[in-house]
Structure formats: structure tokens, C-alpha cells
């Protein structure tokens, strides 16, 4: 394995930043280069080559309870509106007016009968099709051709809503083949109800958060609560399926009982058998937690080369007791705070310029990180000759 000398300074071209020679280095076990986490120009490359071409979790169908309900979201730097029409169908459109570029919707969520631009009152149907421009009759050359809002593909898995800007991309179930069935086989997600939503900013690149979630190599010395809950000395089992991964959590300790002083929460014997942790490229995690009737969905969004937005939604079964809910929220909140400090420390280290590329512990200890970084390298470097990532291991 040979690490590549990273390009430095703004004289480096885009081709230098994502040189295809990084593929062999990363396939051989080198980490992705530091400038992929620090150079602001990488955001535009990632937007075009990762976020504009992938499926993304954007929210819950239940957040759009009736016709005209909408929610505003982003995938990378792309602003979106997801809306339910009169027939109950979900649509996703780019939140930019094709006239002069104004945002169409400024509220985070609400209700509307049609899209109307607040700048010059151009209007569009809820499916994004152009309706009317004031005074268009005074301008004989006016044509509505090409003035529909940019649309995205929409897919739902239970209450989860996903979108893809690439209209030619394969359908969600074709890309993440088998993921829906794996979730259904593990537990009844439809019996869980959306509950607490946590959103917080982290001073670290979005990829660091993804990679941190895909290994527990750091857990024994950084997560005392997890150490009490499960065996953190064993490597995480990685079961890759191309763009989605099952990373098996350790077995919950047999003698675990609720102990609020240690920060753990109750897990029944049956609950130990209903656990599943999955990652969907590029930035979504869905887990049926090691417990009874608890699940989480988490997404990591870039807000800059050194800043990310982390959003986690909890789901609980109706029969879950309030004390168990409080314990679970407190427990995972503590884990998230510990991870935040770790990722921000890594970002500060990368920003120094003292680190180029490192080496992963393979084939087992950091296999999840390696798989993600291979997917990333293929997306960014766009080398037509690169071998595809294996669907299974």
C-alpha cells in the first residue's frame, strides 16, 4: 500500500483532489485523504457525485398528514420541499423558482394549495408543474415550456420517506435490494410510533460521523455505557450488501438489568434477539435497538467542510413504559455526546495539515469504515475501470 501525497493549496485542480490513483490506495487499506475532510471545494464535488445521485432519507410520511401538507428539507446543499397532493401522493421538488431563483417556500412545514413564488407570484401545482405567471398574456413570446419545478424520485418504506434527484437512477428497492425485507424480518417497525427528534450541529465533516458510527473500535475507552450494555471488545461484524450494510451489534449482556446510575436501560431476553443496525449509503442509519420496541433513524448532513447537522429520530412501541423511554433517550444521548467530542477532535487534527493518509485495521476491526470509504472513493473519483464493491462478504 502506498499513500498518495495530498494536493495542497488552491492551485490544486478538482482532478488533483479526487485523482483516481486514490482508489488503489484506499482499496489497499489506506484511509481516505485528509483534504477530503477539510477542503471546501470537496463540498461541490460531493454534491454532484454523491448527493445528487443517491437516495436520501428526508422525513416521515406521518409528518404530511393530509393534502397540501409539506416539509422543507435539504440533501447536501440542495433545498427541497416534500408535499402531499389531493390524491395523497407524495412529491418532492427543488425549492427554487425557475423564474429568477427565489426560494418558493420559506417555512419549515405547513400547508399549501399550490406553490406560489413570494417574489413575482409565479405559481405551480403540487406536483411541480407550471400553472401561471402574472402578466404572461402581455408578453407574446412567453412560453411555459421547461418551467416546471425540478422533480425528484420519491420512495417510502413504512413511515420513512426517501428521495433521489437523479430521475434516471434505479428505484430505491433495486439499489438497497433486501434491506426492506431484512428490517421486516427482524421486527415489526410498523408497530412503532415516531417520538423524540434530536437535532444538533457538530464541528466535524459529515464523513467522520458516518465512519465513527460504522465501528466500535473506539467504544471500550470512550463509551462506558455501551461497555456496560454489550461486549465492546469484539470486532463489529460487517455484512455488506453493496450500498447498504448490516453491522451487527454485540450481544447484550445476559445479566443486564435496569441500572440508572450506570446509564443503561432494561433489555429483555426476547429484546436481545430483535436488534439490527444498518447503514444506507451515503448518510443514513436505521437501527432496531437492543431493547423492546425501540428504533432510531439518523441522518448526517454536511453544512460545511468542518460542520455537520446530525438528526436522530426515536420510535417507540405504544406499550413501552415512560421510564424505559427516558432511560433509552438519556443513554443514547450520552453516547452521542461522547461521539461528538471524538469526531470534533479528529476534525481539529485533520485541519492541522499534519495528517495525510492513515492505515485501517483490516480485515475485521475497521471493515465498516473501509467499505464506506471504498464506496466514497468510487463515487468521487469516477473511475470507470474501478472494480465494483462486493455485495456480500
Image: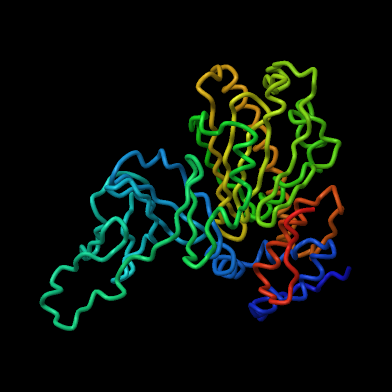
Instruction: Give the residue at the far left of this rendering.
Output: 138
Q: Is residue 119 left or right of residue 64?
A: left
Tally the marks.
Answer: 0
Residue 353 spot, x, y in % from top left: 75, 65
Q: Residue at x 47, y 51 (%)?
A: 155
Q: Residue at x 59, y 26 (%)?
A: 293
Q: Residue at x 69, y 68 (%)?
A: 378
Which quarter of the figure is the N terminus placed in?
Answer: bottom right
Q: Nearer the viewer, residue 248 or 107?
A: 248
Q: Nearer the viewer, residue 153 or 15?
A: 153
Residue 309 spot, x, y in % from top left: 55, 49
| Residue 246 vertical position relative to residue 34 in the rendered view, above or below | above
Q: Is residue 169 left or right of residue 104?
A: right
Residue 351 spot, x, y in % from top left: 70, 60
Instruction: Give the residue at the far right of this rendering.
Output: 1
Please, which colouring scheme is shown?
A: rainbow
Q: Is residue 40 left or right of residue 342?
A: left
Instruction: Give the residue at the far bottom of this rendering.
Output: 141
Query: Quarter of the image holding residue 255?
Result: top right
Q: Nearer the viewer, residue 331 or 387?
A: 387
Q: Nearer the viewer, residue 140 or 159?
A: 159
Residue 107 spot, x, y in % from top left: 33, 49
Amino acid at each position: 500500500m502506498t499513500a498518495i501525497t495530498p494536493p495542497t493549496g488552491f492551485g490544486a485542480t478538482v482532478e488533483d483532489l479526487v485523482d483516481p490513483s486514490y482508489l488503489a490506495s484506499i482499496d489497499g487499506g489506506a484511509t481516505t485523504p485528509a483534504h477530503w475532510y477539510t477542503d471546501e471545494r470537496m463540498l461541490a464535488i460531493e454534491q454532484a457525485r454523491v448527493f445528487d445521485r443517491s437516495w436520501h432519507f428526508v422525513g416521515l410520511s406521518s409528518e404530511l398528514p393530509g393534502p397540501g401538507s409539506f416539509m422543507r428539507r435539504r440533501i447536501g446543499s440542495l433545498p427541497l420541499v416534500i408535499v402531499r397532493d389531493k390524491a395523497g401522493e407524495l412529491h418532492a421538488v427543488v425549492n427554487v423558482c425557475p423564474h429568477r431563483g427565489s426560494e418558493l417556500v420559506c417555512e419549515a412545514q405547513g400547508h399549501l394549495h399550490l406553490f406560489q413564488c413570494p417574489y413575482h407570484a409565479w405559481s405551480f401545482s403540487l406536483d411541480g408543474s407550471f400553472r401561471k405567471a402574472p402578466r404572461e398574456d402581455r408578453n407574446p413570446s412567453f412560453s411555459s415550456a421547461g418551467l416546471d419545478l425540478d422533480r425528484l424520485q420519491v420512495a417510502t418504506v413504512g413511515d420513512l420517506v426517501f428521495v433521489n434527484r437523479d430521475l434516471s437512477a434505479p428505484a430505491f428497492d433495486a439499489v438497497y435490494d433486501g434491506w426492506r425485507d431484512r428490517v421486516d424480518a427482524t421486527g415489526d417497525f410498523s408497530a412503532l410510533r415516531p417520538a423524540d427528534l434530536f437535532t444538533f450541529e457538530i464541528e466535524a465533516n459529515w464523513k467522520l460521523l458516518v465512519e465513527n458510527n460504522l465501528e466500535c473500535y473506539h467504544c471500550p475507552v470512550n463509551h462506558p455505557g455501551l461497555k456496560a450494555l454489550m461486549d465492546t471488545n469484539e470486532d463489529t461484524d460487517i455484512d455488506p450488501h453493496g450500498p447498504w450494510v448490516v453491522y451487527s451489534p454485540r450481544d447484550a449482556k445476559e445479566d443486564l438489568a435496569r441500572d440508572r446510575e450506570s446509564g443503561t436501560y432494561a433489555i429483555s431476553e426476547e429484546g436481545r434477539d430483535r436488534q439490527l443496525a444498518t447503514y444506507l449509503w451515503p448518510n443514513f442509519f436505521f437501527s432496531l435497538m437492543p431493547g423492546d420496541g425501540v428504533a432510531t433513524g439518523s441522518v448526517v448532513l454536511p453544512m460545511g467542510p468542518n460542520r455537520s447537522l446530525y438528526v436522530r429520530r426515536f420510535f417507540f412501541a405504544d406499550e413501552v413504559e415512560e421510564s424505559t423511554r427516558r432511560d433509552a433517550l438519556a443513554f443514547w444521548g450520552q453516547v452521542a455526546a461522547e461521539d461528538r467530542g471524538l469526531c470534533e477532535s479528529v476534525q481539529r487534527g485533520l485541519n492541522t495539515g499534519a495528517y495525510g493518509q492513515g492505515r485501517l485495521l483490516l480485515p475485521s476491526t475497521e471493515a465498516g469504515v473501509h467499505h464506506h470509504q471504498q464506496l466514497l472513493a468510487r463515487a468521487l473519483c469516477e473511475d470507470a475501470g474501478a472494480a465494483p464493491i462486493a455485495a456480500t462478504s
